[in-house]
Amino acid sequence: MTKPFSFSITARDGRARTGAIATPRGVVRTPAFMTVGTGATVKAMFPEDVAAAGADIILANTYHLMLRPGAERVHRLGGLHQFMHWEKPILTDSGGYQVMSLAKLRRITEDGVTFQSHIDGATIELTPERAIDVQCLLGADIQMVLDECTPFPATRDEARASLDLSMRWAERSKAAFSERAAPGQALFGIVQGSVYPDLREQSARALIGMDFDGYAIGGLAVGEGQDAMFDMVEVTAARLPEDRPRYLMGVGTPEDLVGAIARGIDMFDCVMPTRSGRHCQAFTWRGKRNLRNARYAEDPTPLDAESWCPAAQYERAYLHHLVRSNETLGAMLLTYANVQFYQELMARARDAIIQGRFAAFADDIRRRYADGDEDDG
Amino acid sequence: MTKPFSFSITARDGRARTGAIATPRGVVRTPAFMTVGTGATVKAMFPEDVAAAGADIILANTYHLMLRPGAERVHRLGGLHQFMHWEKPILTDSGGYQVMSLAKLRRITEDGVTFQSHIDGATIELTPERAIDVQCLLGADIQMVLDECTPFPATRDEARASLDLSMRWAERSKAAFSERAAPGQALFGIVQGSVYPDLREQSARALIGMDFDGYAIGGLAVGEGQDAMFDMVEVTAARLPEDRPRYLMGVGTPEDLVGAIARGIDMFDCVMPTRSGRHCQAFTWRGKRNLRNARYAEDPTPLDAESWCPAAQYERAYLHHLVRSNETLGAMLLTYANVQFYQELMARARDAIIQGRFAAFADDIRRRYADGDEDDG
């Protein structure tokens, strides 16, 4: 018998909490950072290294996969897990955000969104029902409702109209999911409402009425700034049920993560560790480093001696040489080191919550990442 | 005490031979294929995977490394092995070939060659003495004399003049090596002479008089065709001492390799497995495959079920998706699979020689790679 999806909290420290999401494909320790595997691959990483780095779950993109290689094709090939050699849980976003940021010639109606593929220009229709259909074909363990990611800035009226549409789409997503999903699969709602606290509350209330397995906060980290983001996280998290996972979408820097965990968030995803790894940037326990910097040309010390990651044991001078030479191995090593840093950050956050010292831990992370300086300490 | 460089032959089958080159950094089983790590990295591979794929030795490029990051810098950082996290033997070419193929504004004199760096336009002088100096700074276990890689086609007079210069440079290389090399390091001479048997013989004789640790055959696989290449290999190998390794430079396809092994060659290097891996091409036990080909879009079978390589266990449909999407993981997996295929090919060749069935083995390889068809067999 398939075990149901469940969430349990094992320790709290202030509003921060740590626990576990159980899925048929394994347990996700929370707070969890989901490494992004957009096109059925975490870019420049072997899937076994993603697991070795500590990842319990990855995120894949409905939008990208429905365009290439196609959801039906992935389904015929045994589903996304088998296709991409990743046996642990996968969360898929619904495509709403990517339609807004990547597709051309979008047209949004009550029914859904019609857009042109950024790959081959084909006209594609994405409705709440089709988004669930695609996620079921992929076999995603955690699926997301289709929403309209409200652009920033938005007036209150724009934000309310967008929110209302998203809530109607959430209901249709939920209905479609109830019909089609396999046992043990979960569906999360997405709170919208831009930077308006009352709209965020209204959105949370509406979604809770529909009873989702978890609740995401969307439409943030889109230019509103960290203070406004934290305000909205606080307002929203306060309205969400204690016993369901809370997922802050598309966030963020190490400081963003500890700040959001302190406000009760359990899950995150962001391209930052992987994208930075392909752009010479390393996240380390001594802050961020740009390996292109000439200061590293003869630096014989490891990238990050404080990390357990095998990639972080490579010397900075060698990494500098690789990135200056545009060698793929540079992107491979920095991506690996960054993915593992984010996982180690989450592991330390979980320990700090259990030990009741999360505030001090968060302060320490803020200090390490404070000034953007590269301090060899 | 450092063990000296040595070569021993353990079995013969016709003119084919198998054995071992002992170096202070480990044993190289022959026939050996040296994976190319031009710029202090086998492109798109972790060094531990290069070793796991079966490689006993890699080749690095004097020309590239003297330009970036610089031989003195690598030396200050502990030498090339430590710099690139590769503990086993490294052979470095002398740079002669790359100066001809990559550098701009070359000027060759008796003293050496002056050229402009293809990276930053700097004017660089490479003499036989400097080529040895650079290879000693890198800490290469097997070093190559500086030679002029005779362009193809060349008239007999051109080939002879070029050869004479290379032989004078070989003497100077040998003298410089005797002064500067560390215990256990080896120096190979390079036979030139274009497609003229008597010039090849003359070149071999001249080098043998200088007593090198091994003998390379250069200036082939430059457009002369396989028949002419095999003719020159035969003529040359017949003149080379039995008790020294013979290295055919820059070769080649699986058919080239078995043909040259049958003619007494012990060592090879070529960018083919790594470069092909970055260009959607896979070498398998059923021939070559282009993973971009639409026929693989829904092929659920492994790339090469006959291979032991973990990368070759990935399904063709997934690899097709990765290469179509220009995902780095596609290049990583195909490079790994190709590097391991070449090592498995050498391992099977060694076994076949020991078991006295090399001719049948070579025929089998030729048949598998015969028609360039992609037979799913």
Image (cartoon, coloured by chain):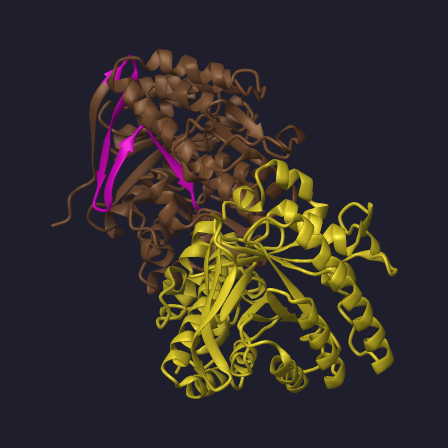
Chain colours: A brown, B yellow
Q: Quadrant of residue A330?
A: top right
Query: Residue B20, percent across and down?
Result: 45, 67
Q: Main secondary structure of the magenta part?
A: strand
Based on the picture, tell me whether residue A22 belongs to the magenta stretch.
yes
Q: Nearer the viewer, residue A257 or B134?
A: B134
Query: Residue B249, percent across and down?
Result: 63, 69
Residue at image point 50% right, 32% down: A302
Question: In the rendered image of this protein, does residue A189 appear above or below residue B269?
Answer: above
Based on the picture, tell me whether residue A212 belongs to the magenta stretch.
no
Q: Quadrant of residue A184?
A: top left
Residue at image point 59% right, 64% down: B213
Q: Is residue A93 visible?
A: no
Q: Nearer the viewer, residue B3 or B251?
A: B3
Q: Nearer the viewer, residue A269 or B52?
A: B52
Question: In the rendered image of this protein, does residue B160 appear above or below residue B292?
Answer: below
Q: Residue furthest left?
A: A1
Query: Residue A170, percent across and down?
Result: 35, 38
Q: Is residue B242 visible?
A: yes
Q: Quadrant of residue A247?
A: top left
Q: Nearer the viewer, residue B258 or B9?
A: B9
Residue at image point 43% right, 54% down: B49
Left or right of residue B90: residue A196 = left
Per the rendered image, the range of residues in magenta is A12-37
Query: Residue B222, percent across and down?
Result: 71, 74
Residue at image point 52% right, 76% down: B254
> Considering the image in quadrants, where does the C terminus of chain B appear?
bottom left
